[in-house]
Amino acid sequence: MFEPSIIIASASLLGLVIVATAMLRGWHGWLELKRRELEQDAAPRQDGSPMGAARIEIADLKERIRKLEAIASGVDL
């Protein structure tokens, strides 16, 4: 009825389909994991206010200017 070569070929094809499906599901799972990691890393950065960072930077620049002016006038800090 069925030749052994047809049975072997169909079993091989079925095995290949099963392995390809398992690998595809694993790939989708890995992509979802990486997507969640990226969303988790991006979330804390959005919580902070850019205005707060600018204020800190301005305060740092003012402190540097104050120190440079003190050095220029000869005052020892």
Image (cartoon, grey):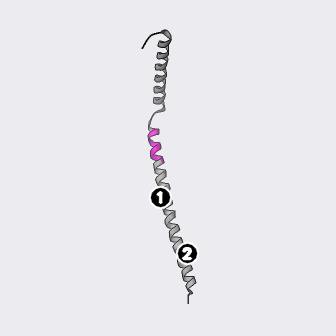
**Where 11 sits versus 2, above or below?**
above
Q: Determine which residue is flagged by label 2.
A: 13
Secondary structure at numbered mark 2: helix
Q: Nearer the viewer, mark 2 or mark 1?
A: 2
Identity of the residue drawn at 49% across and 28% down: 54
What amino acid does circle 1 point to? Gly
Identity of the residue drawn at 44% across and 40% down: 44
Q: Position of residue 31 (x, y in %)?
A: 50, 55
Identity of the residue drawn at 47% across and 12% down: 70
* C-alpha gap between disc 2 and disc 1: 24 Å
Q: Position of residue 16 (x, y in %)?
A: 54, 71
Front position in the image: 75 or 49 = 75
What amino acid does circle 2 point to? Leu
Sequence order check, earlier mark of 2 and 1: 2
Outermost bottom residue: 1
**Where 26 sits versus 36, above or below?**
below
Please state if 4 lies on the left or on the right of 53 as rendered.
Answer: right
Q: Position of residue 36 (x, y in %)?
A: 46, 50
Q: Determine which residue is flagged by label 1.
A: 29
